[in-house]
Image (tube, helix red, strand yellow):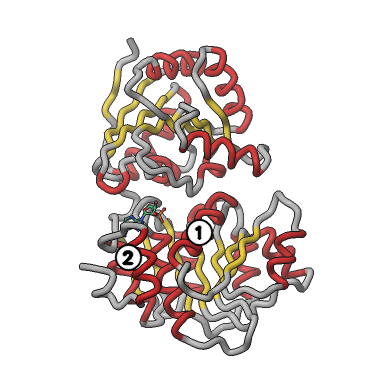
Amino acid sequence: MTFKKINIIEPILKALEEEKYSVPTPIQQQAIPVILKGNDIMGCAQTGTGKTAAFAIPILQQLANRPAKQPNVIRTLILTPTRELAIQISDNFTCYGRYLQLKHTLIFGGVSQFHQVKALRKGSDILIATPGRLLDLMSQKEIDLSNLEIFVLDEADRMLDMGFVYDVKKIVASLPAKRQTLLFSATMPDSIKKLAGKILSNPEYVSVDPVSSTAQSVTQSVYFVEKQDKEKLLANILDDASISRSLVFTRTKHGANKLVEKLSRKGISAAAIHGNKSQNARQKALADFKLNSLRVLVATDIASRGIDIDELPHVVNFDLPEVPETYVHRIGRTGRGGKSGTAITFCSTDEKSDLKNIEKLIGVSLTVSEVE
Ligand code: AMP
């Protein structure tokens, strides 16, 4: 199977070749032909499966092949829950679309709207947005979606977890009824199925992992440890120099900050990313982590969404997530592309019921590791 075989046009093929993408990933093999046909899609895929390209490539191709009804109108909207994810999607469009004449604009909250509005006024074919800023700019009449052809709802489960359900409904209500809609979600709880029933029309279902499964290539284990002993345990684990980088999840922003402080005091380079950090601070922490100049990145779930780091072998659940599906998202950060990964979970007495729910969801009991 090659990208040429699934009829990708020359300018995109050239970009993919330069990216050294030799074969489409399974989600791309399934989704691209369906999207090119103009069908709606319900895609179940975890991060790391190549799902962004699975929608970005056929969207670029359709827009390039089909003339716009009017000049300078937004033809595609991609709605995604977090700024980091929006930036990554935008990077994907820049990458695969570099030999096409299509323009895309990125808008998200937490920064001044000035440059975003300026970019919008110049006109763009593709808009990548987080829900709050999109609604804000729509109410200011800076955005007109009446000519929309394709709507993508990315990371739909996370969108609902973050409480965006009313925003999403409001945005969908403002879109033309005749459109192509693509919904992607890592997990398919009932709330997502219900939403899909409302916004999709005769969708084809594509899926690369059984619902809520974790990657086979990830070794998962749990330490039973009390809250006050978790920092010490983490420091002990990190004594192993073969762990070059570790992504650590805490439940709260405060917890993330506290942990960074404690690790730094022990000489372990660490930084936190969460909603209270400025966009610049988050981007810097992520860049340092990617460049290996930071050993530990401590993240809350919301901030971590969509983090795309190649070859991340180590994830630690310092706190257990309350929503079991979140565990699947976290684990999805490691063991990508067939590489092996390790996911370690710290479970205190009051988190045992959360652990039970996770094990029920993934259908596996985590191996118990003993605290030395
Ligand atoms: P995603 O699931 O969209 O977060 O993508 C995960 C990673 O896979 C990203 O770093 C992409 O650049 C990469 N990727 C996507 N499609 C392919 C492909 N066909 N071959 C190799 N790498 C890919």
Asked if residue 316 is positioned above or below residue 156 in the image, the reply reads: above
Quadrant of the image occupied by residue 169: bottom right
- Which residue lies at the image location 63% right of the left edge and 80% below the top edge? 73
Left or right? Give the position of 74 relative to 141: left
Question: Residue 103: x and y, percent?
Answer: 57, 71
Label 2 is placed on what type of residue? Gln
Question: Residue 274: x and y, percent?
Answer: 60, 38
- Which residue lies at the image location 52% right of the left edge and 88% below the top edge? 67
Q: Which residue is mark 1?
A: 89
Quadrant of the image occupied by residue 1: bottom left
Q: Earlier in the sequence, mark 2 or mark 1?
A: 2
Asked if residue 338 is positioned above or below residue 54 in the image, the reply reads: above
Can the viewer see residue 267? yes
Which secondary structure lies at badge 1? helix
Q: Which residue is mark 2?
A: 28
Q: CA distance from mark 2 to mark 1?
A: 15 Å
* Label annotation for residue 212: none
Towards the viewer: 165 or 77: 77
Towards the viewer: 93 or 154: 93
Label 1 is placed on what type of residue? Ile
Question: Residue 369: x and y, percent?
Answer: 29, 20
- Whether ligand 1 has any atom under 8 Å from the Cβ at mark 2 is answered as yes
